[in-house]
Image: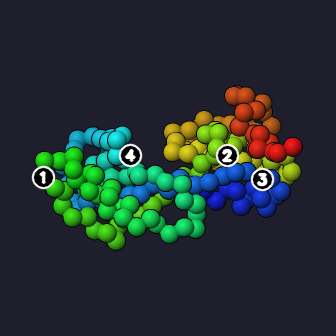
Amino acid sequence: GAHSAALAASVGDSVPLDTERGYHVSFPPGSESLLTRAVCDPSEGFIMTPMPGGLRAAGRVELGGLRAPPTPGRCTGLANAASSLFSHPLPERAEQGDWLGFRPTLPDALPVIGRSPNVPAVVYAFGHHHIGWTLGGVTGKLVSEIVSGQDPSVDITPFRIERFRVF
């Protein structure tokens, strides 16, 4: 995940991992009935999903690292953008439920999958950006094959951490 650069560094591997930070706001129970499916607003950069207990809006991604505080106004802007999609304003959100999540991000948009060249007992599987859940199954299969000594069912050369070596 987003903290994998520290793990890699601890065994002598360098990786230019950053984190995309996605913001999340929730609206009160009952608001989920306003939608029957997830809705994406690409112009505003978010998705709104009916969840048990209320609508959730998530998006407004930024590169911000792991230590920077949340950007003021991002959640309010997200809530306002979500509300603007309806003919009537959404009910006020409970701001204490606002949060942001970290997405491990690499400059070439490919994950790192494979053994550490420095400590072969370490097997990497991180950097899936926003599609970690989507790629989790195939990545898990590849890790299982690597750990058990089988040839991976997919060529993992493009995913090796060595691609980031300067020399």
Q: By what rule are the colours in the image chosen?
A: rainbow
Counting residues from the start of the chain, the first of labels 2 and 4 encountered is 4
Q: How many marks?
A: 4
Counting residues from the start of the chain, the first of labels 3 and 1 encountered is 3
Q: Position of residue 157 (x, y in %)?
A: 76, 32
- At x 36% / y 64%, what residue is drawn? 73
Position of 104 with respect to 152 (left or right) is left
Badge 3 amino acid: Ser
Q: Nearer the viewer, residue 152 or 112?
A: 112
Q: CA distance from mark 2 to mark 4?
A: 27 Å
Q: CA distance from mark 3 to mark 1?
A: 50 Å
Counting residues from the start of the chain, the first of labels 4 and 1 encountered is 4
Q: CA distance from mark 4 to mark 1?
A: 21 Å
- Asked if residue 58 can be seen in this view, the reply is yes
Residue corresponding to mark 3: 14
| Vertical placement of residue 34 versus 10, above or below | above
Q: Nearer the viewer, residue 143 or 27?
A: 27
